[in-house]
């Protein structure tokens, strides 16, 4: 899609203040999604779907933690048959949490699952479609023939869901676009949207509307662009295309990195009013996903502020295609910022003083510039006269927004970027209320910083960042760098794409991810994908340098980008073989001595 075509699209009624997108209500069992309902929290169990007792126990644990909808994988019809027993076990335990069957590849599994669950998730990229990474050109007639074949395969499920009152999620994954879509639209947000709309049209042709959409990707920039483009296309198609939206960053990973990446992708969209249900995908016990998801939703409710609509204007950038704002270069304290330079990390004089004695030992988490001595100019974006004065200066000046400003952070910096001449670099802040509380809960600080700064970085806004919501100097600096890494803005350590466990997983993802981190965590700038199975693995690894994928029980396949190069490696040898593969491709460096001795 061209920039001209993009310019005619809008995805949000007001990009400078919060308003939730209006959608129709879709019922999933006894839970309403969209409409006037709150944002719903979901997760997915990891037990083998054939193990009724384990599945029921996991689903009960999730429900007790606050999970409102529970998903279960159903790889084949045989697996799907046991969903009846899982449902009955949950209901016998007095739990009415709705169940969702996760379907990939197998229409017969979907038809069986729909008998027993409240909702069926289908992935347009691999449901009755081909994913062989073939390169070919489709004529219009060939493309139409493929769509007709899909219609024949998908319509029976639509009819059954309509008859039984089941809901459906048409859930596109960036990593599993079909060859047909890839060859017409490329590996792009547009391809993701068109893939979902093809299936939605089939549903609508059968007068079935109890469905919602998702556009998941492991790269927050891709994920954000895809959802924005989806909502813009739905608005363009008409008022009756107001279906609810499920949000998620797939393969977010674990620990702090997984939480930051999820908060960037999900939080950015929720801040624009998009999203009716969310799932945080962590490579951890799924019960740990629930408090993170709840905190992300709470952070949106706590950050809503109105602003002066009279000062709003069209965006100064294309929200459907990433381009960095074109500021001019400045040099401060020996660090170049603005223009094409890396985004710099500021700190306060107080925090600089606190770590000054150990800066040389802080590795990758060093402060670079002190805000108070940087020549920083603070301007309220609603102050038209102050904006006019700074814009009259021909030389670039680093600009930020003063603490205490009564606007949402994302909306305030968007407005500043909109009104400020592009040659002036911008310093982003995570909050306009600096923390003075050393006991403040770190997870909420992390989510707020990731949502606000990460969202703006993905919009191309920001030449430097300052974390103020965390009181501890070292922890605030680590958070700053980790947000830059997760947004893909400044890569300073190994980047991992790791999927959450589910019933399809062919090895212990949590343990294996930690082993891979221990062996490769010193490889700055190398991207490694750790995938439990092949559903999304090869596709999500398109941006990764190397991939570690479950190919069969206790057997691992290794990839370079999305090409498999080593097959059926015993799991016990696979991490060592991954290291050898990295060495063979000249991406290996030996770890520093102090790391090697730990």
Image (spheres, rainbow, N blue to C red):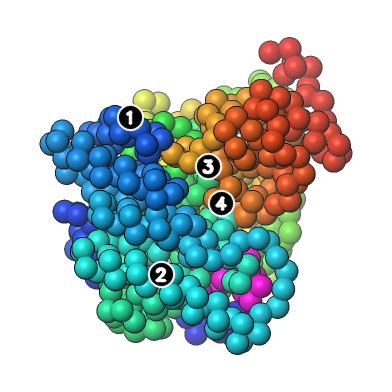
144 w.r.t. 339: above or below: below
98 sits to left or right of 488? left
Instruction: Name the residue tied to disc 1.
Output: 54
Real-space CA distance between mark 2 and mark 4, rounded to the nearest whole angstrom? 20 Å
Whichever of callouts 1 and 3 sits on the residue coming sooner in the sequence is 1
Q: Which mark is residue 499?
A: 3
> Would residue 65 be seen by someone viewing this image from the given angle?
no
x, y percentage for residue 462?
A: 59, 57
Tag 2–tag 1 contact (CB < 8 Å): no
SS state under label 2:
helix
Considering the whole magenta stretch, tell me its main secondary structure.
helix
- Percent position (x, y) of residue 417? 54, 66
Residue occupying the point 31% across, 79% down: 206
Task: Give the CA distance from mark 2 to mark 1.
Answer: 31 Å
* Label 2 vs 1, first from the N-terminus: 1
Q: Work out how far the residue at label 4 is from the one at label 1, CA to CA, in angstroms.
A: 25 Å
Query: Residue 438 in magenta?
Result: no
The relative height of residue 127 versus residue 138 in the rendered view (above or below) is above
**Between disc 3 and disc 4, whose residue precedes?**
3
Judge by depth and name the residue closer to the eye, 217 or 417: 217
Query: The magenta stretch spans which residues?
Result: 182-194
Write the residue at 37% across / 73% down: 155
């Amino acid at each position: 899609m061209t920039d001209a075509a993009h310019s005619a699209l809008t995805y949000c009624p007001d990009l400078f203040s919060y308003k939730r997108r209006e959608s129709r209500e879709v019922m999933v069992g006894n839970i309403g999604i969209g409409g006037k309902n709150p944002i719903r929290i979901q997760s997915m169990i990891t037990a083998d779907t054939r193990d009724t007792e384990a599945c029921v126990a996991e689903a009960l644990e999730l429900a007790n933690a606050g999970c409102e909808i529970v998903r279960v994988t159903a790889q084949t019809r045989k697996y799907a048959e046991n969903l009846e027993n899982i449902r009955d076990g949950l209901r016998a335990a007095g739990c009415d949490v709705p169940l969702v069957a996760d379907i990939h590849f197998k229409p017969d599994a979907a038809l069986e699952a729909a008998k027993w669950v409240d909702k069926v998730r289908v992935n347009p990229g691999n449901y009755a479609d081909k994913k062989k990474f073939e390169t070919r050109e489709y004529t219009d007639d060939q493309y139409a023939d493929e769509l007709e074949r899909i219609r024949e395969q998908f319509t029976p499920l639509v009819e059954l869901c309509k008859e039984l009152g089941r809901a459906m999620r048409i859930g596109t994954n960036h990593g599993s676009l079909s060859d047909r879509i890839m060859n017409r639209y490329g590996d792009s947000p547009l391809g993701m949207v068109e893939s979902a709309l093809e299936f939605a049209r089939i549903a609508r042709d059968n007068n079935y509307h109890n469905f919602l959409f998702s556009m998941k990707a492991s790269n927050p920039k891709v994920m954000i662009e895809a959802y924005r483009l989806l909502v813009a296309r739905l608005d363009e198609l008409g008022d009756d295309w107001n279906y609810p939206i499920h949000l998620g960053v797939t393969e977010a990973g674990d620990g702090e990195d997984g939480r930051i990446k999820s908060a960037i992708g999900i939080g950015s969209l929720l801040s624009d009013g998009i999203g009716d249900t969310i799932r945080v995908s962590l490579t951890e016990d799924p019960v740990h996903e629930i408090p993170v998801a709840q905190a992300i939703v709470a952070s949106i409710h706590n950050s809503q502020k109105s602003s002066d609509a009279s000062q709003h204007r069209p965006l100064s950038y294309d929200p459907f295609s990433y381009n960095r704002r074109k500021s001019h270069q400045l040099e401060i304290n020996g660090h170049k910022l603005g223009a094409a330079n890396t985004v710099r990390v500021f700190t306060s004089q107080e925090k600089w003083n606190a770590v000054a004695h150990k800066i040389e030992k802080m590795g990758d988490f060093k402060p670079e510039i002190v805000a108070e001595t940087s020549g920083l100019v603070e301007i309220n974006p609603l102050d038209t006269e102050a904006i006019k004065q700074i814009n009259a200066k021909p030389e670039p000046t680093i600009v930020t927004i003063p603490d205490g400003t009564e606007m949402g952070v994302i909306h305030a910096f968007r407005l500043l970027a909109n009104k400020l001449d592009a040659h002036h670099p911008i310093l982003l802040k995570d909050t306009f209320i600096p923390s003075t509380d050393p006991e403040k809960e770190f997870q909420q600080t992390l989510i707020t910083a990731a949502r606000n700064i990460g969202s703006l970085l993905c919009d191309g806004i920001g030449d430097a960042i300052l974390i103020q919501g965390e009181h501890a100097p070292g922890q605030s600096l680590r958070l700053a760098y980790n947000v830059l890494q997760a947004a893909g803005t400044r890569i300073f350590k190994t980047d991992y794409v790791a999927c959450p466990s589910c019933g399809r997983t062919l090895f212990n993802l949590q343990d294996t991810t930690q082993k891979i981190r221990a062996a490769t965590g010193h490889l700055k700038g190398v991207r490694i994908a750790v995938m439990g199975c092949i559903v999304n693995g090869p596709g999500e690894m398109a941006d990764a340098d190397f991939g570690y994928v479950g190919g069969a029980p206790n057997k691992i396949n290794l990839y370079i980008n999305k090409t498999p190069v080593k097959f059926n490696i015993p799991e016990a040898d696979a991490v060592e073989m991954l290291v050898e593969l990295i060495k063979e491709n000249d991406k290996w460096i030996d770890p520093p001595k102090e790391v090697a001795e730990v």
